[in-house]
Image (cartoon, coloured by chain):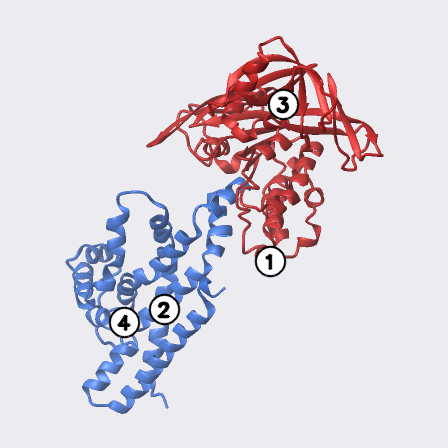
Amino acid sequence: MIRARFELAFPGFALDVDLDLPGRGVVALFGHSGSGKTTLLRAIAGLEKVPGGFLEVNGAVWQDATTFLPVHKRPLGFVFQEASLFPHLSVRANLAYGMRRVPAARRKVSLAHAVELLGIGPLLDRMPGHLSGGERQRVAIARALAVSPAILLMDEPLAALDLARKQEILPYLERLHEELEIPLVYVSHAPDEVARLADTLVAMERGRVVAQGPLSETLARLDLPIRLGEDAGVVLEGEIAELDADWHLARVAFPGGGLWVRDSGLAVGRHVRVRVLARDISIALTPLADNSILNVIPATVEQLADETHPALALVKLDAGGAPLVARITRRSAAKLQLQPGMKVWAQIKAVAVVG
Amino acid sequence: MLSDANLAAILLTLKLATLVTVILLLVGTPIAWWLARTRSWWKGPISAVVALPIVLPPSVLGFYLLVAMGPNGPVGRLTQALGLGTLPFTFAGLVVASVFYSLPFVVQPIQNAFEAMGERPLEVAATLRAGPLDRFFTVAVPLSSPGFLTAGVLGFAHTVGEFGVVLMIGGNIPGVTRVVSVQIYDYVEAFEYADAHILSGIMLAFSFTVLLAMYLLNPTRTHK
């Protein structure tokens, strides 16, 4: 459990948060630049001094009225946006830098394990100047892990990388998520990263928390999708239930239904996350057989809301327990006379397996 | 080729410059660290004081130091009270004066290196459990090593090259305060151009060599 209360006012910017976060899984601090997410993360690390703040991490008070634990005494790992490896030290020495400073009895993550998790074995004797951007960031993550942190803080670790490097690192982050018990607070402005990694979502705007909660629940709240625009959508968790070898499709089952997705070689029984964007869902009153859309599922209208563009509306649907959000035109909503409680069919044009 | 007098002057100069450089690196580093990182109002005035020897005529600096260290000056009273006598016209006095005179040449390169390094490497080190002193020695110093090299070379070379302050504070005592630059002055005054040529040539070669070595060892980052 992480409890954080910070108030800070700069000219033109104010941070004002009061948060209770789960002490496990991945917490995404999400928001546009200037929303205060990085400042909040730095305040948690102690890199930013916020007088009068309060911070408790898993039962230990790191900051209150009388205490301010200096950064180097906080059992945390921090990954910066730029890898910030020490240029005068080899990869191996970079990894050892933090580890050496942790008493042996408190080391839970071995160097070998950190190296293996991030796949950096072949890089150990290289100097940071001779690594690619993606490699550098993987070393930086391993270096933060090697101090056996009680909590791992990451400040947009992928933002400085191109798409290919991002794709290179994301699987490693997912492995951390699956294999380690270390809670991760992850700052990002990229909805795809959040959809893929987060368990808990904290959305920030102008220094304040505007939405907070479990990922799929929070994404389905209509006040947040309004702010997300083109990226509005939900994330559903399910399992691969069956494969259709003839058509190279796989069915992802979740409570209340299933969705056909492209078979990307996932085994039956495998736990997956799928992301369905609001703009890819249309609504019909009857299930039409004569169209190309593969996933047409029954749902109940829960709520309607205006989108920021006056032509558009957002519709929250309940598909047998799974929340969906559809973005349609207001004219269509009026034509169909959509109202809460109505039974409709959600036609889902695209589903992405995100992890 | 070198007379005993010339050799003595050269050895004295090297001894003075070495000692002054060591003291300056020890004294200048904390000053540079503070100047590079402080947001205090005092940064401006202190920077100006440190830089004064660059623009002040050495005779002015020498004059004030002479007065301060003389029998009736505040420093002079202190050294006398401590049983050390007075500093002017001694080797120790020369060392003290040279430290002031060469201070900016040591502080500024180190300060620039600390500023160029920025806050980030220190923040990284802090998140890797390194305390303040630990961070300084294992991160700040190695990352600023080109600045320290420049500072050492400039501090040394500038001390070797000083003249006015030496004359004011040290006088011209053979083996005690008669350094190479003063020796050359004496030769010229006495029309002994052959000896003046020898020592001047050595000084020129030395200065060129250290500066060349510094620029070769310290390529600017733009070369990459």
Q: Earlier in the sequence, mark 4 or mark 2?
A: 2
Q: Which residue is mark 2?
A: B156
Which residue is located at x 32 percent, y 43 percent?
B39
Residue at image point 39% right, 57% down: B110
> Which chain does the residue under circle 4 lie in?
B
Q: Do marks 1 and 3 share a subunit?
A: yes
In the picture of the structure, the residue carrying the numbered disc 1 is A130
Q: The chain coloured blue carries which letter? A: B
Q: Residues within 10 Å of mark 1 (few under 14, many from 20)?
A: few
Q: Amino acid at mark 3?
A: Ser
Task: Mark 3 vs mark 4: give the one in front.
Answer: 3
Q: Amino acid at mark 2?
A: Phe
SS for tag 2?
helix
* Left or right relative to A42: residue A170: right
Q: Which residue is mark 4?
A: B162
The extreme top residue here reads: A341
| Mark 4 to mark 1 CA distance (whole Å) | 44 Å
Which amino acid type is marked by label 4?
A: Glu
Q: Which residue is mark 3?
A: A282
Q: CA distance from mark 3 to mark 2?
A: 78 Å
Chain letter for the part of the structure drawn in red: A
Asked whether the residues under marks 4 and 2 belong to the same chain, the reply is yes
